[in-house]
Amino acid sequence: MQEVTPARPLWHVILVRPETMTFVLLIAAVVVASQLSPYFLDISYILRSFTLSAEFAIVALVLTMVIIAGEIDLSPAANMALSACLFAWAQASGIPMPVAIGIGLLAGLAMGALNAFMVIALQLPSIIVTIGTLTLFRGLAQIIAGDKSIRVPDWFIGIDKILVFGIPMPVVIFVLAAFVLGLILAGTIFGRQIYQVGTNEVAARYAGIRTRRIKLVLFLLMGLVAAVAGMMTASRLGSVRYDLGLGGELQMVLMAMLGGTYIFGGRGTILGTFLAAWLLVVVSTGMTVANLLPAIQLTVLGVLLIVAIIATNFIYSRTQR
Amino acid sequence: MNIVRGILMRRETGIALMILLLCLAVGLYKPQFLTMNQLRVIMLLVPLVMIVAMGQMLVLVARHVDLSVGSMLGLSAMLTGMMFRDLPQIPWGVGFIVAIGTGALLGLANGALVTIFKLPAIIVTLGTLNLYRGLTFIVSDARQVDRQFVPSAVKAMSQTSPIFGIPWIIFMALGVVLATYWFTLHTRVGRQIFALGSNPSAAALRGVKVNQITLLVFSISGALSGLAGIMYASRWGFVNPSNTGAGFEFQVIAAVVIGGVSINGGVGTVPGVMLGVLLLGCVAAALPLLGIPGTAQGAIYGAIILIALLIDRSVRQQGIASLKWMRA
Amino acid sequence: MTESAPLLLARGVTKAFAGVTVLRDVDLDLHKGEIHALLGENGAGKSTFAKIVAGVHRPTRGKLSLNGRQVDISSPLVAQKLGVTLIHQEPISFPDLSVAENLVLGQGEQGWFSRVPWAEMTREARRQMDQLGVSIDVTKPMRGLSIADQQMVEIGRALASGSRLIIMDEPTAPLTPKEVDTLFGIVRRLRGEGRTIIFISHRLEEVRALCDRVTIFRDGSKVATDAIENLDDAEIIRLMIGRPLKEYMHKHNASIGEVALEVEGLTLPGRFQDVSFQVRRGEIVGLGGLVGAGRTDVACAIFGIQPAESGSLKVNGKTVDIRQPDDAIALGLAFVPEDRAVSGIFRTLSVEQNITAAIPGRIAPRGFIRRAIEKLLAADSVRKLRIRLASVNQPIGELSGGNQQKAILARWLLAEPGILILDEPTRGIDIGVKAEFYDIIGELAEQGRAILLISSELPELLALCDRILVMAEGRLTAEIPRAEATQEKVMQAAVPRQQAGIAA
């Protein structure tokens, strides 16, 4: 008779988790940053800094679910730009505001649907498909907006200036989104099946799980949330240009990876991405406070991405027996 | 008859026809498109993409992808430009060694991350795309290298040459194309890249050194990006930390996949990629004549990538269908 | 044709995978210039032995000598250098490279940048194909070739590398009769040149037509080696299956009820044709046959994983259309698939999650998972099926194969199916756990469930089933009631008959 492998002790289960790594890094980053500048002990300063990345962070939450399901989407930052451009262009050409917002959201959904169609119906690898759509969406945004920036109405501007109990609106939305998505991923059968599809798609199919439907929902959600994020950015900046959110895919993927999402699917949590978003904000704000050039921050982000996937893969390879 | 059919069925023929049709259509609408002057415009547009596309083709054939080519181009160009500026006594020829060497090292780093840590190339190069761009800013202190610092001999290479006044950079691109053609078809290692991409596990069983070849293709992609970097300095006369090479990866990938290189590895030809680059060049040259703003380029590259994926898919399905037919 | 010094000498070759011994103390001599057949049931060890000789696996114990010199065949590459080549049933090749390149790749030790001599290579490839007497355009990519032609290329490769020993693992399975004739002609010529061929096949007629000697494997051991003339078919079959029935298997006493599952004229071109049968409540129907006979394909078609193109399905008397697995589940079907790792378990997820995967409606009545219910159901299953584990929260990958299989069975039992399809449920499982499985299957039938049991183990089919259906090459070839079932009968129906005569 085969020996039964003993269960790992609880401390081991908790400690050897990528989220723990993210949390420890977050604490370390706060400690180091507060040595650099006393501002860091001012919560409202950190919250204000967070508004700059809040839109990406919200999208990163959905991206986490997409990656857990075994796919990837590199196009949401371009989606943000295109849906925001369409929205801004529509309202600038006299279409009533609610309709313009509807156009933007529908555009986002349509972009999600395009990705879903190529990946699910045509069975093309999502990684290459979304590189293509990323280029296409950004290019279309450029056609619509040209080199100009399109202003949005004054009343629409300033979502980041609205405070709810002293917390800026984008941060509130992010926290709420994290809460809801976290609940869905951890608590519902839909969330459970996302993990199962990402762990073993064939087995999921044999168990009667509608794998295609799950992926379709995720790509559509991705498109819709990216459109919302695009409009939030428009509100924060006061105007829309084609390069809105340019390069955002790096930050989104980085947040997911830093939060311990496994690049090959099947593992990861919303909590991890939630923590990673704060970590990233503290790091980049810390770099700004330390007077580092934005470009150096780019370097740091690139290094972080590579280190994060190496670390995550390492942790998972240790826990997988 | 068979030979004729064989030629007609080839991907290269299809692209060549597309180029021809595009030129005729645009030419009918705007006759100045078919002038020598316009040819010169196209010929000056394509060499950089052409050179980088050759490297990207090798990477894709080996079942990887390199998103960092634009940043490698930028960083190599910046280091070379700074050398020209800060050490003017060094002969300009050294610039080529610096540019190519820098690129090769950056590419080697990509390859090392992919092979040592078994990471997907797309994520690694998405990381290094930003990392290398950031390094460009750091080494340059975010300052541009201006026209006066680029040696006139280097700049002249984009203007003329003793041979019919055709600029040197066109010959360089042609040289790289011929060398890649020879490399992919007539060297052992060149064929092994195709074997690796065609069936990685079988390749390992047949003694193909998978890791070394992966390192090699990424290094070549880097080195060619580096070469394109110094050619950028030659062509435009300056190196800018944020513009030089930015977004280049999408043009290159679009050209390579429309040129018939399969994203599943193992398939791709140098003539196909060359025609793919030319097609993109013709499109880019035609846009302003047709009154379409240059801003439409991005969308066109994106559409081309997606269309190429669709073509690739239909070709693959045919293959599977014919196999089924034979077994029945 | 036997010569004094054997080409290959195997002594005490033993192989164990993860503690399970699949090959035990095999001694075998192969002579120069002979065609030697390896026969045995699925899993008897013949393919494992062949793979050890070809360097795919390394023996756990034992020695191999080639031409009197002891060798360590550590990889296929080493095997090739020693002159041993394994030809797979569906050749592993480089579909995008030309035939000529496929022939030479991996040969020679030139440097990286040495020139590829295309003209010479093509000429040499043509010469080899001519020698084999086949007309293949060597400049065409491998992708478009038929399986038969791909095999020819593999044989050509073996010859080009000067192989003395060529192992063919069921080469004729995907071939047409005409192609088989061509292949046999070539194999005989190779023997004439003094080469040795190991020929693995299930088709006795082919073995008889082609081979000089046979070696028969059973349960991982060699049971006999003899000249083919000395053995008749009945004797060979007896040697292949002749083990005593294990006494722990017992037949249940279920009352057989109405028809639960009825299959009529099910066809999926290239996989199976015109398959019709019924399974009644409380009945265990066995589906026997060799690997690749189409049994699993039929099961997948019934369950909606790859639906059939024509034919009809009735569940409890009603015609149904099953397009995907959850349609099947809704109708009360369950399917325990053959390959646990690929299509059964979620390796890194908890045992609990694995067990409850097929009943989303019960653990999450309104979309939200009710942990208490899930825990209860999982714990209940663990107790009932005696799954041995440390905690239901540990990843299922940490469990032994038998307990993983129990968990998958538990998953389907929770769905309370009326019809259960079990595909090789006891493969790769310890003997003790196997016995438990047999008890469980018997109990399930007693509860009035209809069971379709796919198995390659004859004793298992004979002991458990009320009826045995046998498939060969995509068709049902026999339906044997329990009273008349013998191992010989099942085996005879399972071994494919060659339609056209084989040139002797």
Image (cartoon, coloured by chain):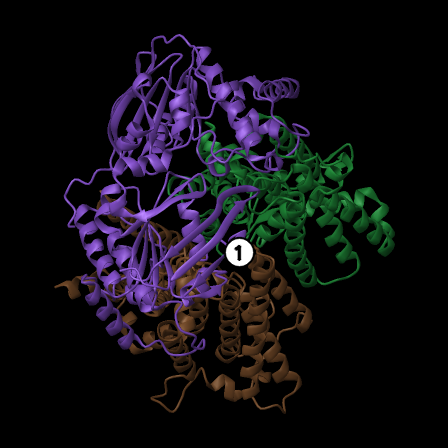
Chain colours: A green, B brown, C purple
Residue B17, above or below A33: below
At horizontal 81% and vertical 50% (from top left) the residue drawn is A28
Residue A32, above or below C390: below
Residue C262, above or below B164: above
* Left/right of residue C162 with respect to residue A177 in the rendered view: left
Circle 1 is placed at which residue position?
A: B122
* Left/right of residue A316 with respect to residue A227 in the rendered view: right
Residue B294, above or below A111: below
Residue B314, position in %: x, y?
A: 30, 49
Chain letter of disc 1? B
Asked if one can make out residue C314 in the rendered structure from this viewpoint, the answer is no
Residue type of the residue flagged with mark 1: Ile
Residue C189, position in %: x, y?
A: 22, 61
User: How many labels were placed on the picture?
Assistant: 1
Q: Quadrant of the N terminus of chain C?
A: bottom left
* Left/right of residue C62 with respect to residue B35 in the rendered view: right
* Left/right of residue A176 with respect to residue C435 in the rendered view: right
